[in-house]
Amino acid sequence: MRPVLDHPWNLRVPEAREVQEKLAPRVVFRPFRKRRYLVAGTDVSFDDERGLAVAGVVVVSVPSHETVAEAWAEQRLTFPYVPGFLSFREIPALLSAFEKVESQVDCIMADGQGIAHPRRFGLASHLGMVLGVPTLGCAKSRLIGEHGEPGFKKGSTAPLLIGEETVGAVVRTRDGVSPVYVSAGHKIDLEGAVRVTIECAVTRIPEPTRRAHTLVTGVKRGSARALPAEANRRSPTRPRA
């Protein structure tokens, strides 16, 4: 899978902001009506000792939850950690991983935000526009917005609001567990994004992104074992924008 949109990634923060503000109005919302589909989950981990991003993509069949493809790639980091600009740090490595994916992909589930973002253009929106594929954000924590508590049962939701604008949904993926934060990315609407999230959920984290996280964690651990002992230090954990 190759990009349909290209722009520089090694930018200063003001330039990155301009890219977000330029592309955000081009986000498209449309229904996602497929009942049998292939969803690619993404996750990125960082190897700070070597200055690398380790990206993983796992393609899962719905409703069977069978893994049909997986790929990973390492990419040199060119953008610092800045809240709200996660896409510039992660997408170059994700594009390298997606180049290795030979399976069809009907939609992408990104471990991050879609339009639930200060400039309505988070990681999922950016990735979806670059690849031209329906994409949703499914994050473990909130970046912006206010919400009430969804119901106890799996499938319960509450709107994620900025003022009177609905930018996402707080979704219970299993009875009683902490919810996840779902937002439309590109070429999908919020209803479709929520449905895909629930249909992919077995545990709290939906299977595509959970398996992608497992993949990159294994790759990173294998790379760490290959490093000299003095380089095998634990890096501080930082929140995802």
Image (tube, rainbow, N blue to C red):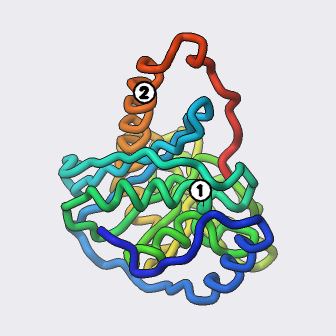
Left/right placement of residue 90 relative to residue 101 reads right
Where residue 103 appears, as percent x and y from the top left, is 19, 61
Label 2 element class: helix
Q: Residues within 10 Å of mark 1 (few under 14, many from 20)?
A: many
Q: Is residue 20 above or below residue 30?
A: above
Q: Nearer the viewer, residue 8 or 104?
A: 8
Task: Report the amino acid beneath label 2.
Answer: Ser
Where residue 68 appears, as percent x and y from the top left, is 18, 51
Report whether residue 176 is seen. yes
Q: Nearer the viewer, residue 65 or 75?
A: 75
Residue at 50 percent of width and 86 percent of height: 28
**Figure quadrant of the C terminus:** bottom right
Label 1 element class: strand
Q: Nearer the viewer, residue 131 or 148?
A: 131
Q: Is residue 236 above or below residue 241?
A: above
Where residue 185 appears, as percent x and y from the top left, is 52, 72
**Figure quadrant of the N terminus:** bottom left
Q: Nearer the viewer, residue 30 or 211?
A: 211
Q: Which residue is mark 1?
A: 181
